[in-house]
């Protein structure tokens, strides 16, 4: 009986993934995608797993390290959720224009509320997606920037990491391709 159950499970798993049925539910047999969530990610997650860059691949990112340790620019406290999750506040965070909450996202408001936190790719898509990207004209720039997923991550992460390095040169705040990304073979 036990062998029959294992065999049925194996056949069902194969049928689901071989027919592509799983892809209609955005399920991967290797790793779950980063999705809108009401739970903070635990441990290391991989960003840019599907990078189309010819040299640079995925980035290892630890949400807990950034949200629970003294990783703010001064090194004196945690990074506020809205520093990265710019839409999760009651008003715009300049230079951004989009905001969607009545109260600013915090760990407490996430645990107490019913709203999910959107993944970056809810709004910021890969360059060749064919979807309309948000655009923004940054201070000091004359042309609008299309905020693809790659552009949004680099602007958000590198701006903060560069500010940390300027304030605290000894801090481990990577801001070059090879200190964040895995090099493709």
Image (spheres, grey):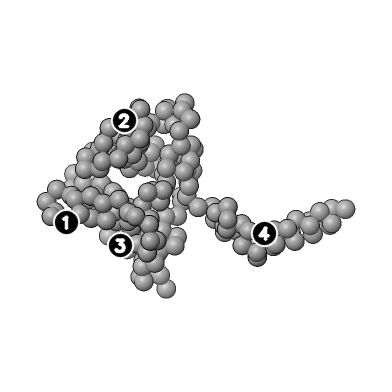
Label 2 to label 3, Cα distance in Å? Answer: 34 Å
The percent position of residue 13, horizontal first and vertical second, equals 69, 58
Res 63 → quadrant: top left
* Mark 2 touches mark 1? (CB < 8 Å): no
Picture residue at 55% right of the left edge, 54% below the top: 26
Which label sits on residue 90?
2
Return the residue at label 3: 177
Q: Earlier in the sequence, mark 3 or mark 1?
A: 1
Query: Which quarter of the figure is the C terminus placed in?
Result: bottom left
Residue at x 42% of width, y 27% of height: 108
Q: Residue 24 at x, y = what percent? A: 58, 55
Compute the Cα span from label 2 to label 4: 42 Å
Q: Helix, strand, or loop for circle 3?
A: helix
How packed mark 1 is, by other alpha carbons closer than 10 Å (few <14, some 14-19, many 20 or more), is few
Q: Is residue 54 visible?
A: yes
Q: Secondary structure at mark 1?
A: loop
- Compared to 65, does 176 lie above or below? below
- Above or below — where is 182 with respect to 65? below
Dot 4 alpha-carbon crowd within 10 angstroms: few under 14, some 14 to 19, many 20 or more: few
Q: Residue at x 41, y 58 (%)?
A: 48
Q: Which is in the foreground here, disc 1 or disc 4? A: 1
Report which quarter residue 84 is drawn in.
top left
Any part of residue 170 in sight: no
At numbered mark 2, what does the secondary structure look like: helix, strand or loop?
loop
Name the N-terminal-most of marks 3 and 4: 4
- Judged from this view, the residue extending furthest toward the bottom is 185
Instruction: Mark 2 and mark 3 in contact? Answer it, CB < 8 Å.
Output: no
**For mark 4, what is the residue?**
16
The tag earlier along the polypeptide, 2 or 4, is 4
Q: Residue at x 39, y 37 (%)?
A: 68
Numbered mark located on residue 161 in the image: none
In the rendered structure, find residue 143 and report the number of the disc placed on it: 1
């Amino acid at each position: 009986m036990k062998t029959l159950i294992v065999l049925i499970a194996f056949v069902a798993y194969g049928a689901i993934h071989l027919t592509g049925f799983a892809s209609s539910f955005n399920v991967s047999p290797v790793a779950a995608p980063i999705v809108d969530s009401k739970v903070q990610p635990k441990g290391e997650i991989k960003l840019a797993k599907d990078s189309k860059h010819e040299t640079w691949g995925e980035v290892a990112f630890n949400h807990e390290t950034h949200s629970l340790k003294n990783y703010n620019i001064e090194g004196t406290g945690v990074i506020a959720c809205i520093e990265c999750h710019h839409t999760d506040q009651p008003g715009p965070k300049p230079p951004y224009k989009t905001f969607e909450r009545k109260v600013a996202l915090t760990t407490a408001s996430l645990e107490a509320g019913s709203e999910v936190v959107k993944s970056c790719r809810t709004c910021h898509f890969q360059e060749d997606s064919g979807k309309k990207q948000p655009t923004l004209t940054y201070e000091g720039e004359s042309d609008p920037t299309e905020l693809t997923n790659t552009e949004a991550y680099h602007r958000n992460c590198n701006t903060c990491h560069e500010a940390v390095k300027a304030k605290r040169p000894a801090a481990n705040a990577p801001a070059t391709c090879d200190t964040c990304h895995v090099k493709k073979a």
